[in-house]
Image: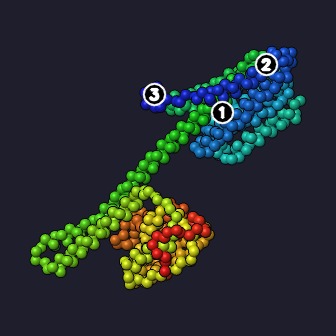
Amino acid sequence: MRSEKGEAPVPALPKHYGAILLSVLLLPLSITLYLDFFVFPERRWHEHLAHLLVEGFCGLMSLTVSYVLHQESSLAESHRLRVMSYGFLAMGILDVFHAFSPPGTDLFVWLHSIAIFSGSLFIFLSLPIVRVSEQFSRSVAGTALVGIGALSLGVLSYLFQAWLPVMRINGVFTLPAIGLNVGAGVFFFIAGLAFLKDFRRTGETILFVLALAMFLIMESALLFPFSKLWDLQWWVWHWIKAAMFIGILFGLAHEFVESVKELQASHAKIVESEKLASLGEMAAAVAHEIRNPLGTITNSMELLKDFRISQEERRELLEILEREVNRLNHIVSDTLDFARARSSRRQLFDLASLVYEVLQRARAKAPEAYIKCRSETDLPLIGGDPHQLQQAIWNVVDNALDAIQHDGAVDVRLRYDDPWIVLCVRDTGPGIPPEIEREIFKPFFSTKSEGTGLGLCIAQRVVSNHGGRIEIASRPGSGTCVSIRLPCAEASARPQTSVGKPVQ
């Protein structure tokens, strides 16, 4: 069911995750019961082994939670999460020491008690009602100090056991043991209330999980000093503690999944906004480019209506109309080539023959220009769509012709540079100013009065789709060189059929 706010329900725990959770909780208990009733009913070593497994597991889970909270605090710049991570860090380190301590000794009870108390203290200090130096919690030194402090406390406890307070007398816990555990229980209870209050205010699931975990570990802390080693009550609070850590991990995992969903939704909105912005930019650019030829066409048609104009003037107006209609067609064709993803018909072909066809078209457009071509012999084949590549090369050559104003020179060179075939188109035009060199591949950017600004953009897309790259080197006053690098298909193969004639 959905809530009144229309929020999606929390997804149910998948069955296989539930099975993993159940097996993790029941495995140590099953081993303990099996050894207790069927193998060694009079001995306790197997209970020590089960205790080591449970406490070791809790220690590792506490360190894992500390790491996750530390990373989350760095991303969210949260002072509260960083201090909470200190609590789980100290508790995890001391729990590992406790797991390997001699069972039943003062060291055994001391390490457990100080572990749970230090963890509860830092979690209590993370609450908004307590003021802790943010400079300490935000620095890397804070985590290092807490970790080194917990390690030092564990090592010193082992080295100076004789100096530890007496924690048990005749199987009964003393005031230091009771005080540390009850104090931890109080701190966890206050933290649980604070998380529950935050959950009621924000509705965030992770806050409810943390509140539940604080109440569970509070029960564990309060049960400890009133239990006896290895009795049923002793094991109950151990399972509570293990379940608490598993619950926190699943809560953090759920929070991570929700964060990923929100990130994906935000990314989708950004992409949609960028698409709309690009569409608006394209519409504005196309409208701007179309307005000029439409105005010329309108004026020419108005003049054609005047019966007093001569046949010569009528012919000139018709030529203007034809030129402007061709210009409109060019604008529409370029826009469509840019906007739509054209299907690619990949095949092996000879790039030199393709370049020859492009240069034939260039000579027809600018017969007065000096167009020179040099090509190495026996170039390997390339794979791709020859029609798309022909259009890309033509866009580059056409730009070179416009740069030289039809009376300069264009030098085309085709060479092999393993594993590439490199096509260089160099012109003797004015060159490209440094301040606009980075802009020339952007859609609708053009320095020509009648350009759409899509030619080089389309060329770059086609070359990139064929696994190549396009580079530009230019110096004002010294012309421009455009290099197209395309990967070879087969270094030794020669084309069976050529597209056009060889380059001369």
Gap in angstroms between the C-alphas marked 2 and 3: 45 Å
Circle 3 residue: 2
Question: Do the residues bearing badges 2 and 1 touch, measured as CB atoms within 8 Å?
Answer: no
Of labels 1 and 3, earlier in sequence is: 3
> Is residue 111 found left or right of 305 in the rendered image?
right
Circle 1 residue: 123
Residue at 81 percent of width and 22 percent of height: 47
Q: From where the camera sits, is residue 118 visible?
A: no
**What is the secondary structure assignment of the residue under circle 3?**
loop
**What is the secondary structure assignment of the residue under circle 2?**
helix
Mark 2 vs mark 1, foreground winner is 2
Q: Which mark is residue 144?
A: none
Circle 2 residue: 34
Mark 3 surroundings within 10 Å by alpha-carbon count, few (fewer than 14), some (14 through 19), many (20 or more): few
Residue at 87 percent of width and 31 percent of height: 161
In the depicted view, which residue is nearer to us: 3 or 378?
378
Of labels 2 and 3, earlier in sequence is: 3
Residue 468 placement: quadrant: bottom right
Q: Is residue 9 above or below residue 142?
A: above
Mark 2 surroundings within 10 Å by alpha-carbon count, few (fewer than 14), some (14 through 19), many (20 or more): some
Residue 15 pos. (x, y %): 60, 27
- Callout 1, which amino acid? Ile
Residue at 63 percent of width and 35 percent of height: 126
**What is the secondary structure assignment of the residue under circle 1?**
helix
Number of callouts in the render? 3
Residue 392 pos. (x, y %): 45, 67
> Is residue 445 found left or right of 292 in the rendered image?
right
